[in-house]
Structure formats: structure tokens, C-alpha cells
Image: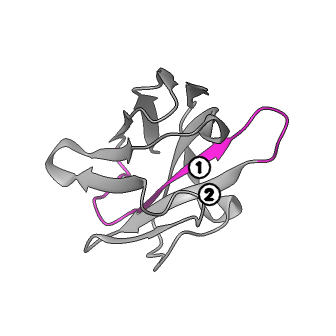
Amino acid sequence: QVQLAESGGGSVQSGGSLRLSCVASGYAYSNSYSMAWFRQPPGKEREGVAGIRVGGIDSYADSVKGRFTISQDNAKKTLYLQMNSMKPEDTAKYYCAADPRLWSRLRPGNDYNYWGQGTQVTVSS
């Protein structure tokens, strides 16, 4: 099994920055897993934010391109999401996801097998 634990959420003003972290653990986890960040705004459906796979190949939702950066530290088994120039519409619960398949880009949520519990991000105007 694989366990994912997110941290780093909080409240920030519009234009500010936050960095989310997701630590992976469990005997089944490998650094070759495809990883991703998703979010679920209040009253809305979950949406993909960014994805990354082995080799550092990353992809982003149009709404966050140029503002968010996904990265990973394989030695620490940790996935990051650096969020800059944040907007009130970035307010959501953010989730880390992982899958053993090698996705070349961000996939729909149903394609990821493992999920964290989420961390809340609130951006005020």
C-alpha cells in the first residue's frame, strides 16, 4: 500500500505564496510513480492542478500555468506544489495523488490509485 500525507496549507492574501508538501510512504511506493495535485473548491467538483512523472516531465491546468510549479525530491519521497501570485479562486482543499503507471501528463482523478487526506488553502482578496 501507499500512504500520502499533505501539509503546508493555510490562509494567504491575494498575490501571496504557499508551498504544499506531500510525503509518500508504504512498501509499494516507488519514485517512478506518477504524482499529481488536485483541488476541490467549495461547492465544486474536484479538478486537476498539476502532474509530474519520472524524468521531471510536468503538466499543468491552464488556470495555474505560470503561477504554480510542481516538483519532487526523490530522496525525501516528497512532492511539492509551489503556488505564487495566488488568487481567491485558488481557494480549495488540495489533494496529493499517486499512481504506479507512467502518465505522460496530468490525468483525470480516476486514473490515480492513491490519495492523501488533503490540506485546506484559503486565499482572501
Q: Estimate the x, y position of residue 73 in percent, counting from the top left.
A: 20, 50
Q: Which residue is mark 1?
A: 38
Foreground pick, 107 / 62: 62
Foreground pick, 34 / 69: 69
> Considering the numbered disc 2 on the image, is that residue within a helix, a strand or a loop?
strand
In the rendered image, the vertical position of residue 125 relative to residue 38, given as above or below: above
Magenta part of the chain: 27-45
> Considering the numbered disc 1 on the image, is that residue within a helix, a strand or a loop?
strand
Per the image, is 122 magenta?
Answer: no
Dots 2, 1 in contact, CB < 8 A: yes
Left or right of 72 in this view: 93: right
Q: Estimate the x, y position of residue 32 in percent, counting from the top left.
A: 31, 66
- Quadrant assignment for the C terminus: top right
Q: Estimate the x, y position of residue 61 in percent, counting from the top left.
A: 57, 64
Left or right of 9 in this view: 32: left
Instruction: Residue at 52%, 31% (x, y): give it.
Output: 14
Q: Dividing the picture into quarters, in which one does residue 52 lie?
A: bottom left
| Amino acid identity at mark 1 | Phe
Q: Which residue is mark 2?
A: 48
Q: How is the image coloured?
A: one colour
| Amino acid identity at mark 2 | Gly
CA distance for labels 2 and 1: 4 Å
Provide the major secondary structure of the magenta segment: loop
Q: Dividing the picture into quarters, in which one does residue 70 lie?
A: bottom left
How many numbered marks have been drawn onto this rendered protein structure?
A: 2
